[in-house]
Amino acid sequence: SCELDAANDADSDSICGNDDECPFDAENDRDSDNLCGDVDGCAYDPANDVDSDGICGDIDSCAVDAENDADSDDVCVPDDLCPYDAEHDADSDQVCGDVDSCPYDAGNDYDSDSVCGDVDTCARDAENDIDSDVV
């Protein structure tokens, strides 16, 4: 019984309300962020959703990435050098696939004929074998 606590330990944590720093939080600020769980939007996240994406860090797969792995490749910013390219620069030309005009051609249309090398039958011939000699 809590003689000085009219609510008589409302959160049932065995600490009378007059001595309880969080009288309505049975876990008494479990994440130690100085916010009682009954008013803490992220009661188990001491950083309180540090990336402000609306997902508390204790359940956020990308706790410091507000985009939450936009390309669904299981790599979070800042480690994801191409955050909107799920294939991580497939041709390794240092240009992310979402902005690469030839995402599967490391030479990025080497012969400048507007045909990417991965589909260009004459990748080093700007005229694409104009004489049809297959050379």
Image (spheres, rainbow, N blue to C red):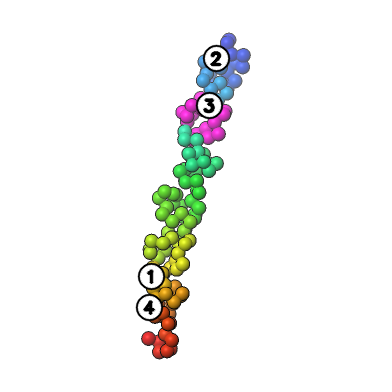
Q: Looking at the rendering, in which quadrant would you find the C terminus?
A: bottom left
In what element is the residue under mark 1? Answer: loop
User: Could you tell me the amino acid type at mark 4?
Assistant: Arg
> In this picture, which residue range is highlighted in magenta?
27-45
In what element is the residue under mark 3? Answer: loop
The answer to whether mark 3 and mark 4 are in CB contact below 8 A is no
Residue for badge 3: 36
7 to the left or right of 64: right
Q: Earlier in the sequence, mark 1 or mark 2?
A: 2
In what element is the residue under mark 2? Answer: loop
Residue for badge 1: 107
Q: Earlier in the sequence, mark 2 or mark 4?
A: 2
User: Could you tell me the amino acid type at mark 3?
Assistant: Cys
Tell me what residue is drawn at x 53 percent, y 26 percent.
Answer: 36
Tell me what residue is drawn at x 38 percent, y 78 percent.
Answer: 124
Residue for badge 2: 18
26 to the left or right of 126: right
Whether 33 is among the magenta residues is yes
User: Mark 4 Cα within 10 Å, few/some/many (few <14, many 20+)?
Assistant: some
